[in-house]
Image: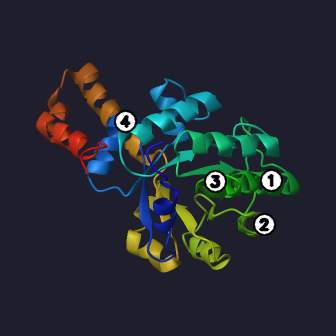
Amino acid sequence: MRHDPGPAFRALHRPGAPFILANAWDAGSARMLAGLGAEAIATSSAAHAFTLGRPDGGGVSRDEALAHAADLVAATPLPVSGDFENGFGDAPETCAETVRLAAEAGLAGLSIEDTALPGAHPYDFDLAVERIRAAAAAARALPRDIVLVARADGMLTGRYGLDEALRRLRAFDAAGADCLYAPLPPAAADIATICRATAKPVNALAAGPHARISRADFAAMGVARISIGSALARATHLVIAEAAEAMFGAGDFSPLTRGLPGSTVDALLVKGGPAGR
C-alpha cells in the first residue's frame, strides 16, 4: 500500500462543516468524481450490485466487495470507504475480520449496518452493539488508521423509529464507532436530533426526499459527512432508461445529444487518476 489514507480521511469529518463522500461504482466513475472535485470516494453496495447485473441486495460476496473496493483505491489518490452492508456475516468475529480485510485492501474507512441481511429485520440490540464493539476493537488493533461507521438502518427499513435509532447510535458510540449513521429518518429535523445525541461525526444521506436538503442546511444540523449512496448511479440508470425508451419506442435518438464530449470525459479521467492530482 502506497500510504495510509486514514488520517487524511478522518480529518475530513468535521461536524458542522460536512464534506461530500462521493459514492462511485467503478474506476471510471471514481476518477470522474475525483476530477470534478470529490475529496473522498466510497463504494455503494447497490451501485456495485448493478454493475454485476444484480439487484440491490442481490448477494454480493465479501470477496467481491473487497476486490471492487481495491479497484477504487487504485483508481484515484483519494481516500476510499467501503459500504460493507452487515459486515458480511452475523457474528461479531466476522465483522472484526471484515475490518482487517478492509485495511488490507487499502481502505480509509468502512461502514457496518445493523440489518440481518438478506432480510430486513434488525439484529437484536445486544448483538448489534457487540458486532460494533468487535469491529472497533479490530480497527484499533490495526497498524494504521481506519474510520469505522456504525449504521442504524431501522428507520430506512421501517423496522424501528427514531427513539430506537438513537438508543442504538448512542450504544454504538460507546462501543467505539468513529462515525454514526441512521439513513433517511422520516423528518429532516431528525437529522439534527441525531447530531445532538453524540459528539462523534454523523453521516447523512442525500437521497430520496433528503436530496432536496442543501449542504448548508446539513451543516446547520451538525452533519459532518454527506454520502449519496446509490443515488448518482440510479440517476445514471435513469438516463439509460429514458434514452432507451426513446430509441426503442419511437426511434428517437435525440436524448443522445446530451452526452459529454469524449474529450471532456478523457480529461476528467486523467485529472482524477493517481497521477492527475
Q: Secondary structure at mark 4?
A: helix
Q: Quadrant of residue 130?
A: bottom right
Residue 228, image x and y in percent?
Answer: 45, 53
- Horizontally, is 143 left or right of 117 in the view? left
Q: CA distance from mark 2 to mark 4?
A: 36 Å
Determine the CA span between mark 3 and mark 2. Answer: 19 Å
Above/below status of 23 relative to 150: above
Mark 1 vs mark 2, CA separation in Å: 9 Å
Frontmost residue, 88 versus 253: 88
| Residue located beneath label 3 in the image | 156
Mark toward the viewer: 2 or 4: 4
Amino acid type of disc 1? Answer: Ala
Asked whether the beta carbons under mark 2 and mark 4 sit within 8 Å of each other, the answer is: no
Q: Classify 10 Å Cα crowding around label 2: few (below 14), some (14-19), many (20 and above).
A: many
SS category of the residue bearing label 3? helix
Q: Which residue is mark 1?
A: 128
**Earlier along the polypeptide chain: callout 1 or callout 4?**
4
Residue bearing mark 4:
27
Mark 3 vs 4, N-terminal side: 4
Q: Is residue 79 visible?
A: yes
Q: Is residue 190 above or below residue 232?
A: below
Q: Which residue is mark 2?
A: 171
